[in-house]
Amino acid sequence: MRAYAILALRIDRQLSASGGGPVLMYSGPGRWSSQVRAEQPPPPGLLAEDCEHLLHDLPFDGSRARYLAAQLRSMRVFARRLAGEDLPLGELARQCLGVAADWQPESLFEAAHAELDAALPAATGSLAQRLHAWQGVHTLRSEAHRLPELAGWAVTETRARTNAIVPLPPDTAVECRLSAGPHRGQYLGERRSVIHLNNSAPFNLADLLYVVAHEGFPGHIAESMLKDIELVGARGLLEHQVRFMISPSFVVSEGLGLHAQDIIFPGDEAQAWLTDAVLAPQRIPPDGSDFAAIQHARNVLWGVWGNAAFLAADGRSDVEIGNYLARWALLTEAETKWALDAVRAPGMSTYVLGYYHGWRILRSWLDHPERSARVRRLLTEPLLPADLEPGSAT
């Protein structure tokens, strides 16, 4: 465990220094992270060799060995990249994410656009204009400071529904904060968590459960907390204190996040709850739109981000990539700029491929009579994309 943790910390330190990180979630002994911060960074080539040694000398077998090997293969790729080696994006995805990620046909996005067309209120203008208008109608404006309070109500509801699938510790504490940067769920340990809500852009209240379920319950916070309890605490699998983010396990995590609302709010239940608990008190009347269908279509459109990452890897211009994102992902100008920065960023250009493919893989896997049991497995077992693909034994 010590050699694995030290290696991950060393790679993360050098990736961060080179502008490509941080890419590690670490909750292991502080003395190991202190050691790495204080030492002279070793050559990247040596880090790649260390990955090879650990891969060939894993002291475990079965699913534990497969999980560790997947993490180490991802770490090895980035150690080699630090040493100057380059790989095509598709091969990076195969080695780092454990998925066969390739260009997605625009016919897929055309179908998503048709779904949006049917789900949005009838209006003049392009599909993008109608989507942005729908977002604007549902934006929290006059009392933006109340967003953490509203999110807290959503946390209470999503926790209760998640608890019906998998028992949660009764002393779980979640704080909702306004923060710079994208929405994110952060598990702090000891049953404490924070949901950071982006305060740099207007918040669409129609997405409140979609965001809170993704970042909180049954999404990222639930997964981090339950695996900390089950894998680290109960089973002593200390490697789960060292989570290299550009890896197969995070494809599963992001897929779970994108399915999180649907798991606990089937059909139109999310829209019904939002209408009664949030939108009506904010004097936002029903407009005939279908929230679930809109969010489903937007999940499909994560494939556009993946295609944009391939365009960036091919050396296409910012103008061409930005136009592609605006055309197919229907992003605003500000969203397009943020997406363009993401698909050009080292590491993130690979990570974004995990959203669509994680959603795609879990969509089929969760369509099963034992859906609740499978959700429990996602939250408590170290599953990889290969475990969930059609034909796997799981």
Image: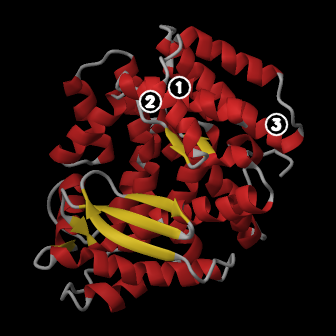
Q: Position of residue 170 (x, y in %)?
A: 60, 83
Q: Residue at x 69, y 64 (%)?
A: 229
Q: Which mark is residue 11?
A: 1
Depth check, mark 1 against mark 2: the one in front is: 1
* Amino acid at dot 3: Ala
In percent of width and height, residue 123 lies at 18, 67
Q: Check disc 3 and report the residue beneath it.
A: 65
Label 1: few (<14), some or many (≥20) within 10 Å?
many
Q: In terms of secondary structure, where does tag 2 sit?
A: loop
Q: Nearer the viewer, mark 3 or mark 1?
A: 1
Q: Is residue 298 visible?
A: yes
The Cα–Cα distance between marks 1 and 2, rounded to whole angstroms, is: 13 Å
Q: Residue furthest left?
A: 142
In this view, the residue in front, 280 or 220, is 220
User: Of helix, strand and loop, which one carries label 3?
Assistant: helix
Dot 3 or dot 1: first in sequence order is 1
